[in-house]
Image: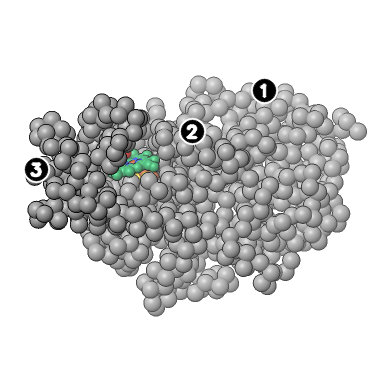
Amino acid sequence: MAKVEFKVPAVGEYLEIPDLQPGVMAKSAPFKAAPRHQQALGFPGELVENWEERAVAKLGELLSKYRSLRVHLDACVKCGSCADKCHYFLGTGDPKNMPVARQDLLRSIYRRHFTLAGKLFPRLVGARDLDPSVLEEWYSYFHQCSQCRRCSVFCPYGIDTAEISMAAREILDEIGVGQKYCNEILGKVHTIGNNLGLPAPALANTLEGLEEDVKEDTGVDVRFPLDVQGAEVLLIPPSADFFAEPHIDGLIGYAKVFHQAGISWTLSSYASEAANFALFIGNYEQMRKVALRIRKAAIDLKVKRIVVGECGHAWRVAYSFWNTLAGPFDFLDPRYPVPQHIIEFTHDLIERGAIKLDREANDHMRVTFHDSCNVARATRMGARPGGQFVLPREVIKASCNHFFDMAPETIGEKTFCCGGGGGLLTDELLELRVKGALPRMQALREVQQEHGVTHMAAICAICKSQFSKVLPYYEFPMETIVSVHQLVSNAIQLGTNS
Amino acid sequence: MPIMTVIYALLLYGAAAVFGLGVSYRVLTYARTPAPLKIPTMPAPVTRTGVVFRVAREVALFESLFKSSKWTWIFAVMFHLGLLLEVVRHLRYFIQPIWFWTVLVQPFGVYGGVVMVVGLLGLLGRRVLIARVRYISQPSDYLMLLLLLGIGLSGLAIKFLDHTDIVSFKAFVLGLLYFDWQPLPDSPLLLAHLSMVAALLIAFPFSKLLHAPGVFFSPTRNQVDDARERRHLAPWAAQLEGAGDEV
Ligand code: HEM
Ligand code: SF4
Ligand code: SF4
């Protein structure tokens, strides 16, 4: 593939706040959805004639449905605390990538149409009318937000630019200007059951191949069951786990854990996708439709528990929204949280001594951990707040001897997005993705130099794909990125307990 | 009744009404708008009590701002704390007899005014000097700071330069409260001070000053992290249930 022409930002001694470079990213925009992708989701195929009116009406509707939008559009005092917190701003220097400036792209229209001050004195309060240039700006800059919520941590009112960009994308869909990547994928989930469009026979084939590989590797018959009625656990992984590296090593890890714990499990060919891209376009109905597929699969397969694989935004939807969208899950075993994360599942087995891990198996690695943005700031694991930071680290430390954290201001709740989240993991946005990865690359470079770190583990399909792609731009080997359950897979002692 | 007294009495009544009704309307809108999804910024408290403390820390300590920028935090605390002290100090004009604790606050109140003005100058300096903050500033953002500075400086001037007749001013204020109007002391500084306060009250419900009620209503800060344990369903979302579902 031809490389896009752009300059990879230099990784310096420490992360610098860039000078403002207005407009440098104004040309960045993802491909637009074709009419058939739009119509499959019930959106207009192309820009509707009275789009200004429809956009304002949709904004009004969203204002009445979402308190977050209403309060967050009103409350901002322009203090600028969030301004230097976004990885896309830090990586590009484009001032419209400062979270507050991104919000203002929508706020200016909100003020013009929904506030007295904006109706009477537009210039004074930065209100403006909708015109084609605003539309272009929306499409460009609301697709330069990975909805990672880092800005929301630092805002005194918790203003979440992710909420604003979701609303903006919803308005864009409503007037017929959808994004190809997200909307095409959503069509596939609705019809085939996963983002890849991998039909059931191909999935069965893949899983069979995996069984053979593991058998060859370990001599043990580890199963990858599909559509098994009455299994204890339904596993919902991101579909990237079926084919991409290093994702697939994570899937092998889950299978070995189930095997070793002696807990029956199954995948579903009807719902073989944890990721819910409707989150990215902010659409409640679409998000609900994807979630209901999983509910149906769980009922049809008569399972007792649902466990979700390593996927960041997916875990957000599963943890925070499934109960709302597709609950109540009263048909499942009430002794377990619904849903459970595979990390929670494995962590519990390790604590109970139900699986044994040999750390030395990973002695060739010096590992750090990338907190995925949506796991960190939109979910929890375990019983205590912050468990989403503790549990994965404990699983890693139980699997390897050499673990080192990156700088504190780049992990935990302050973690940086990988640069590819929120529906931006598409090739035409490569420049944005590479530049947006700068803060993480900076932190990784530091632990590489200080501690000789060789690998970075993650629990998100998007993070893994994004890093595989951008690491080489920063002169790290592509294989630096690993799945957490890949470490578990290497370390697990198969056949040690019966 | 001097004409100025009538004008200012009406102005202050009007401003108070706009402020009261405007803010109530806004708050009612916030309260009535559903929050359909669980979106607390994590890690978040897992109990209601925990959330009360989280919001209290945001209001009293500006916790998130502290994480973000120490300088902004310092100026912001100076301004808001100064303002709070001044507001409490001003209560002495409204109540008779004066409560015991408002008496205690009086000497600090003076510092409050100075601290508030210094804080405001710091915030204004940031806004002018830092390119990022300048970029996101609208004219109204500067005007708001200038208005507050105007209030603070005219207040300090009254205190230190003018020595307006406080006793008759208090009579004027109590007169307004009990609908028994008394003449307003004739001081240009006082008139300027009062005009700006009226302007602030009128602007409040239509401006970013809504951050004050807003902080209590922000779902990212006031929601409990209990999505798995408790089903959260907004009325409009409940209406989708059953309609055309396969399950
Ligand atoms: C619940 C009460 C309040 C809280 C928690 C609160 C909190 C904050 C915070 C955290 C900031 C951001 C930092 C800064 O730029 O100063 C801010 C800004 C501001 N606040 Fe408040 N505030 C409250 C009430 C008020 C009131 C009553 C006023 C005025 C009458 C006010 C006026 C302002 C102004 C003008 C700014 C912007 C300062 C600037 O331009 O930099 N606040 N507030
Ligand atoms: S949500 Fe993340 S990507 Fe979006 S503006 Fe905030 S910090 Fe930037
Ligand atoms: S931190 Fe919050 S209040 Fe401050 S500018 Fe950003 S969004 Fe606005």
Residue A344 pos. (x, y %):
71, 38
Cα distance in 3D space between marks 3 and 1: 77 Å
Contact (Cβ within 8 Å) of mark 3 with mark 2: no
Mark 2 neighbour density, 10 Å: few (under 14) some (14–19) many (20 or more) = some
User: Which mark identifies residue B187?
Assistant: 3
The residue located at (67%, 29%) in the rendering is A394
User: Which mark identifies residue A401?
Assistant: 1
Q: Amino acid at mark 2?
A: Thr
Specify the quadrant of the image occupied by residue A298: bottom right
Specify the quadrant of the image occupied by residue A9: top left
Q: Amino acid at mark 3?
A: Ser
N-terminal-most mark, 2 or 1: 1
* Chosen colour scheme: one colour
Chain at tag 2:
A
Contact (Cβ within 8 Å) of mark 3 with mark 1: no
Chain at tag 1:
A
Residue A358 pos. (x, y %):
76, 26
Which residue, given by chain and number where applicable, does mark 2 sit on? A410
